[in-house]
Image: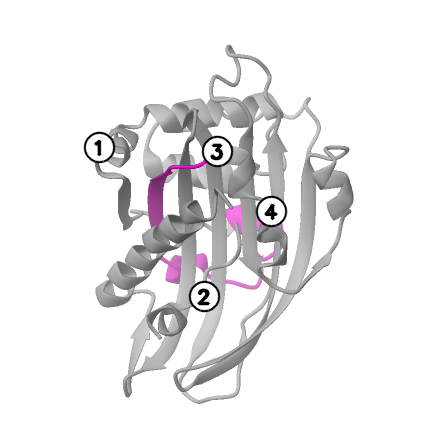
Amino acid sequence: MTARLPLFVLLVGASSACHVNKAPSDLDGNAHWFWANYVGGTDADIAAAVNTLNGIPTISDVLANGNWTGVLPSTLSKGELSVVTLEKLSDPSKAPGLVAITDMPCTLDKIHTGTYVSYARTYDTSIDDYKSRKSETVAWTSNISVDQASNAYSETVKGGLRRIPDQGKTITPFGPVLLSRTWLTKPAVFTTPKGSFAQDYQIEVYYERTPGHVIHSFVDWRQLTVVFLGGQVSSADTTYQSVILSNDVNWDKDSAKLCGK
């Protein structure tokens, strides 16, 4: 639910009257749907999309192997950036989408305990209302500075959480659902040469498929170039993609270890 750090660091609500299309039954389309409908989808829409996600064959691979990673066949479109008002400023075709899905031995309530201070955040809505369930959503802005491995930059990120309450076995057979959406509001400012971080759009879905086992789908469309070991790597490079996806899986493994604490 927090923004992942780049490669070099890892290596060292709308009205219910609005019509929302049914979530596609393929992994790529499903990820795009969650990005676009994070706010506008009703609780029932989101729950139905989670049920569709659970039926995608990829989930069977996750259950058999503990995780699944890959590259999505399509990027976001300019129209899809309208939900974060960046459609006139960015070219999302340059930001490939990476997806990591894991089966975390944890409960949903434990997954998001303690994550609110992962970065220094300014809350745009009340975190206390979210924790008390007076509100099922919370939003924040983070100003982050990074200085690692010959790359230094600062960035501003907006993000939030949305919780879908348990509405019974017919609608939410897996109980409550947790979503997170995060995006880079403008290109990061580098103070070292040859680096650039132009775009980052993340959508995450958490649901407790069986008691004590959470499915976590993490999708990240990112355009990044950094200097590493004297050369440049970018989010379009297969080397970058394989390493970052491996680290996404390890992130969840480490997070699951904290569930009992």
Mark earlier in primary sequence (3, 1): 1
Q: Residue at x 57, y 64 (%)?
A: 89
* Within-10-Å neighbours for mark 1: few <14, some 14–19, many 20+: few
**Residue on which the image places disc 3:** 107
* Amino acid beneath label 4: Val
- The image quadrant of residue 120 is bottom right
Q: Residue at x 36, y 49 (%)?
A: 253
Distance between mark 3 and mark 1 Cα atoms = 19 Å
**Residue on which the image places disc 2:** 5
Distance between mark 4 and mark 2 Cα atoms = 23 Å
Q: Is residue 1 above or below residue 131?
A: below
Residue bounds of the magenta highlight: 80-106
Whole-percent x, y for residue 48 in the image: 49, 22
Q: Nearer the viewer, residue 215 or 110?
A: 110
Residue 238's label in the rendered image is none
Are the residues at dot 4 and dot 1 in contact (C-beta closer than 8 Å)?
no
Q: Is residue 55 above or below residue 223?
A: above
* Within-10-Å neighbours for mark 4: few <14, some 14–19, many 20+: some
Where disc 4 sits, the SS reads: helix
* Amino acid beneath label 1: Ala
Distance between mark 1 and mark 2 Cα atoms = 28 Å
Look at the image and say whether residue 98 sits in the magenta stretch: yes
Residue 64's label in the rendered image is 1
Residue 83's label in the rendered image is 4
Mark earlier in primary sequence (4, 3): 4
Q: Is residue 93 left or right of residue 133?
A: left
